[in-house]
Image: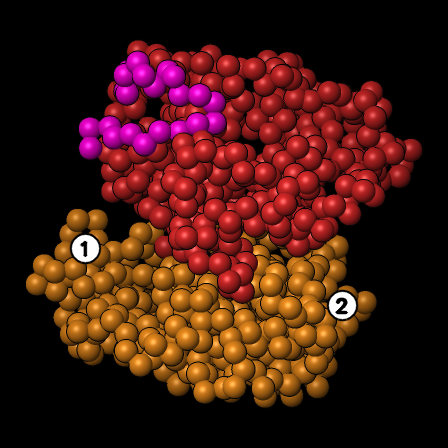
Chain colours: A red, B orange
Amino acid sequence: MQDKKNFGFGTQIRKSPYFNSTVKWGVTGFSVYNHMYIPRDFGCPEQNFWNLVNEAILCDVAVERQVEITGPDAAKFVQLLTPRDLSKLSVGQCKYVLIVNNEGGILNDPVLLRLKENHFWLSLADSDILLWAQGVAVNSKLDVKICEPDVSPLQLQGPNSGKIMEALFGKSIIDLKYYWFRELDLDGIPLIVSRTGWSSELGYELYLRDGSMGDKLWEKIMVAGKKFGIKPGHTSSIRRIEGGMLSYHADADINTNPYEVGLGRLVNLDIDANFVGKKALNLINVNGIKRKQVGVVLNCEPLTRPNTTFWEVTKNENVVGKITSAVYSPRLKKNIALAMISIEQSELNNELDVKINDKLVKATIVEKPFYDPQKKIASA
Amino acid sequence: MQDKKNFGFGTQIRKSPYFNSTVKWGVTGFSVYNHMYIPRDFGCPEQNFWNLVNEAILCDVAVERQVEITGPDAAKFVQLLTPRDLSKLSVGQCKYVLIVNNEGGILNDPVLLRLKENHFWLSLADSDILLWAQGVAVNSKLDVKICEPDVSPLQLQGPNSGKIMEALFGKSIIDLKYYWFRELDLDGIPLIVSRTGWSSELGYELYLRDGSMGDKLWEKIMVAGKKFGIKPGHTSSIRRIEGGMLSYHADADINTNPYEVGLGRLVNLDIDANFVGKKALNLINVNGIKRKQVGVVLNCEPLTRPNTTFWEVTKNENVVGKITSAVYSPRLKKNIALAMISIEQSELNNELDVKINDKLVKATIVEKPFYDPQKKIASA
């Protein structure tokens, strides 16, 4: 990172429209997500957490690429792509949905936005749903167009995010309800603005519809946010694990079904419409699951960083699962984790062993989310 | 990279079975490819190039994930996935193929291996072809099973790679022809071994079929290769650009068609079988292309590193294309690049301007590949 502006490994991985802004504002580390760089460090992940929960942070999440679905059969096709009942999805509304394959395995957990009757965006986690959707369309006999538009989201999250949005867009923005969006223009910058995020805090996403205006948008928000304590930031592993939110590839993958991660509420088997995976999910629902995601507290010294491999979980020396995401919460003063555990060993208060760098650590199954279990902060 | 063994951003990005070996052997930087870390630096990319062209390097390319296609209709389905005629593909043979969407846009450029009559692997570049293939299968009415098996390739490349393979597998390995493979066992390590690679040098790929044996395999090869000057390494941007080889997302993407990158030979429009994109590619073939990939020499001081953004190419101040991959070749003592240029400006010896960090640099269109134009080294 000596030469940040020219950071990169060739053009194979793309830079976001906010790349230069995040460099200017002090980014110290990037990861890669949907074939693009994503800021993952501004010097201190714990400080980023406190900035998020006490004031507000602005995060470059341009990596949340959009899959745009239009055409006369768009609504029918989008329902084919998800087990969630979309019959009551209004124009202007968002829904958190799962995309599953023919076996019911999770391929992505995007936010779906309905821009018009037959105009949708899937705002993606990290997998090429553009390819999946185009593949499903090939023999579907449905008349749809599927592409990746020039759309790059920012997340403005934290308790002061509402005040900053008001400073930018005026009083009326406060009426925007949780999981709804509006089409707005900020001094000529074309935007979709939604009350969504990935923090379990009050928050907004600003979907920039012209990649050439990235730095301009970033600076405008930082100026408006200054008196409300805004800081440049990144999605917080601490806060999202506290909130029990999934990170795709970590806590769920193509071999995980919705019931295993406690998202059966996103599967509506009783609707008339067909969707990919309906038969398989019906069977899983009837037969029951063999393993399940649980919350775990690790009884050891504070972890200095999130786990970078899946940690083996045992009971009486038998492998019963794996820790998928673990982190130290400075607010709860505990090591908290999400784990995938065999159903027989998944009851609350069960004590398990976790292998961390060849040492065994005691772990206890607890309720999740670890903080704000009713999710009242984000949806208030 | 202070704490290399624990390097990472959570479990969202996977580590290869060779991860610990590459750390032990001195890796200094990783990129991300197919949701996994890939070594991209062992301290000096130029030294890595000389190691490759003069002796041999061992590269962790576990990121080349395999899509396995089996079932009674596997052969028919694989032909549906690619415009290349597969009617003469034998068991034991590989082919370089393109995967395109319904519009003829390139989704990936894998190596296809036929393990049995109805058992195939697609050894991938960086995109989720597992999702594409499963999506195409949904309504195809073909009886196939599509998954990602536990297979992690290594590349052993360079003029001494044959001698090292002989030391490992005995004399008979020398008979293995270019783009053929064998199923082999190395002291209990199950492998597929092919005469393929991504270096334009003599080379082999070793597809490990048991991820738990990664470090064991790595060490065996390093021991056998010691007297032949083997070095740990990574795919060389210098050598692959010299060889005019594509890097997906850099030199081609979903909006690029096979004819634009000079790969019309991989499109067999005259076969009876149907394949995705046939109609669109036929139309492009009839109407001709509007832009084309060319080789370019940049007439400026030696580049200190590959470009990390697409550089704009102009002629008389009009934009006529972009530089997709550029690097300084210490052997040719020139800055060489691949560029996508409008067809009117794509003739040999045409002089163009390239904008690099706000400065204009003169560029000349030249023949490619830049080195070994007949590709005799790799196929000999």
**Residue at 65% of width from left, 70% of height from top?**
B142
Residue A182 image position (x, y, % from top left): 35, 29
Viewer-proximal residue among B30 and A335: A335
Closer to us: A264 or A30: A264
Residue lying at 32% horizontally and 61% vertically, measured from the top left: B324
At label 2, which amino acid type do we have?
Answer: Pro
Say which element carries label 2: strand
- Please name the amino acid that badge 1 sits on: Lys
- Chain identity of mark 2: B
Graded by Cα atoms within 10 Å as few (under 14), some (14 to 19) or many (20 or more), the crowding at tag 2 reads: some
Identify which residue, B127 or B71, lies in the foreground: B71
Q: In which quarter of the image is residue B310?
A: bottom left
Q: Which mark is residue B355?
A: 1
Q: Which residue is drawn at 60% across and 67% down?
A: B140
In this rendering, would A194 be left or right of A168? Answer: right
Compared to A6, does B77 lie above or below? below
- Residue of label 2: B190
* Highlighted range, magenta: A167-188
* Earlier residue among tags 1 and 2: 2
Residue A284 image offset from top left, x and y in percent: 77, 45
Please indicate, yes or no, whether residue B83 appears anywhere in the rendered image: yes
